[in-house]
Image (cartoon, rainbow, N blue to C red):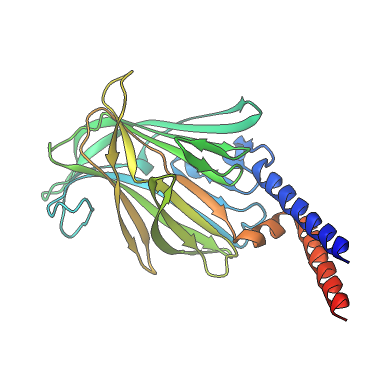
């Protein structure tokens, strides 16, 4: 009897290890140029109108829920209460750049590094910066270079000691270079808008912000959840950014804070960067998933059936033993 129970437990152990291997090495991501879409084992990302606007869903689940993340604009502002937050009703906006109105140059390539497949899609643009004044009208104060480098990997990787889930997470390098500052004391806010399509209808997901740590690195995430969606999305970012003042020099690290405004009608996060010279590099990511074992069972039904069968066998053995 003990041998049967031991055999069943060993079988369960092997099943969960196989499931872990399936999760670690997902199938290679695929790029579909005609649809501006990249598909990984557990995520589909569509790039809307060749802008840094993203529609994200789990493969086969887009009829249920699609999450939308829009990098909308950059705002130079004076932090009048010096709280490292962006508040439209308190702080003074000096200028802004509309990311959605820029003409983006787009390129895509597939990279194989030691058997790990990466699809990399890069958006680059020179964007005009407009002054925000009380008198109205449009005054151009200059331009800057913006780059969004998007990565999806076929297997779990670590980038700067931050784990990235293979086939389920889109890593984004946000690169801002040569911003034309109006004021030497001002800061920069990156405005990000969250939305969604739920069972074919536009809506606003329920958004919750929380802080956490990964290997002593301070992180934040905004979890997006649509009602009855069956899965969630997370916008993740490190609470530090790199400042590269000159080429071939070691970057400095700068703190990144955030302001969140979530309601039934809108969901917006502003990432706040300090005043900087040179180039700022920040690397958020977008992840989709469901809950633990449920995710594994949905993803691999055969494993789910085997697990349930093994549990029933163990239960039957224990009941028989008691009799």
Residue 224, how many percent across, how many down? 47, 60
Q: Nearer the viewer, residue 113 or 18?
A: 18
Farthest top residue in view: 248
Residue 130, how many percent across, how many down? 22, 40
Q: Relative to residue 146, is residue 163 drawn left or right?
A: right
Q: Residue at x 36, y 67 (%)?
A: 263
Residue 188 location, quadrant: top left
Residue 90 location, quadrant: bottom left
Q: Residue at x 84, y 58 (%)?
A: 7
Q: Is residue 277 above or below residue 287?
A: above
Q: Is residue 202 above or below residue 37?
A: below
Number of residue marks: 0
Farthest bottom residue in view: 323
Q: Nearer the viewer, residue 34 or 196?
A: 196
Q: Residue at x 18, y 54 (%)?
A: 83
Farthest front residue in view: 2
Q: Residue at x 60, y 35 (%)?
A: 33
Q: Is residue 204 in view?
A: no
Q: Quadrant of the C terminus?
A: bottom right
Residue 132, how many percent across, how many down? 17, 46
Q: Nearer the viewer, residue 112 or 215?
A: 215
Q: Is residue 121 above or below residue 315?
A: above
Q: Relative to residue 210, is residue 297 drawn left or right?
A: right
Q: Quadrant of the N terminus?
A: bottom right
Q: Relative to residue 20, is residue 87 drawn left or right?
A: left
Q: Is residue 217 in view?
A: yes
Q: Relative to residue 236, is residue 184 drawn left or right?
A: left
Q: Is residue 139 above or below residue 13?
A: above
Residue 97, how many percent across, how many down? 28, 41
């Amino acid at each position: 009897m003990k041998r049967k129970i031991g055999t069943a437990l060993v079988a369960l152990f092997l099943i969960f290890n196989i499931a872990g291997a399936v999760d670690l090495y997902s199938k290679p991501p695929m790029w579909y140029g005609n649809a501006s879409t990249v598909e990984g084992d557990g995520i589909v990302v569509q790039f809307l109108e060749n802008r840094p606007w993203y529609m994200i869903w789990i493969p086969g689940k887009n009829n249920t829920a699609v999450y939308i993340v829009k990098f909308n604009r950059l705002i130079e502002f004076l932090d009048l209460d010096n709280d490292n937050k962006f508040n439209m009703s308190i702080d003074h906006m000096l200028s802004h750049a509309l990311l959605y109105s820029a003409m983006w140059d787009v390129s895509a390539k597939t990279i194989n590094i030691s058997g790990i497949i990466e699809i990399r899609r890069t958006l680059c643009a020179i964007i005009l910066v407009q002054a925000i004044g009380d008198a109205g009208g449009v005054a151009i104060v200059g331009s800057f270079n913006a780059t969004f480098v998007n990565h999806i990997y076929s297997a779990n990787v670590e980038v700067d000691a931050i784990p990235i889930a293979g086939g389920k997470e889109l890593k984004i390098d946000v690169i801002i270079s040569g911003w034309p500052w109006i004021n030497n004391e001002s800061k920069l806010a990156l405005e990000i808008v969250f939305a969604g399509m739920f069972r074919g209808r536009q809506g606003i997901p329920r958004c919750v912000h929380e802080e956490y740590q990964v290997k002593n690195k301070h992180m934040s995430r905004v979890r997006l959840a649509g009602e009855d969606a069956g899965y969630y999305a997370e916008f993740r970012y490190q609470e530090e950014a790199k400042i590269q003042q000159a080429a071939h020099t070691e970057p400095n690290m700068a703190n990144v804070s955030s302001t969140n405004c979530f309601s039934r009608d809108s969901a917006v996060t502003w990432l706040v960067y300090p005043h900087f010279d040179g180039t700022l590099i920040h690397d958020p990511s977008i992840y989709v998933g469901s809950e633990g074992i449920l995710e594994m069972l949905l993803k691999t039904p055969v494993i789910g059936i085997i697990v349930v069968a093994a549990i029933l066998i163990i239960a039957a053995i224990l009941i028989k033993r008691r009799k």
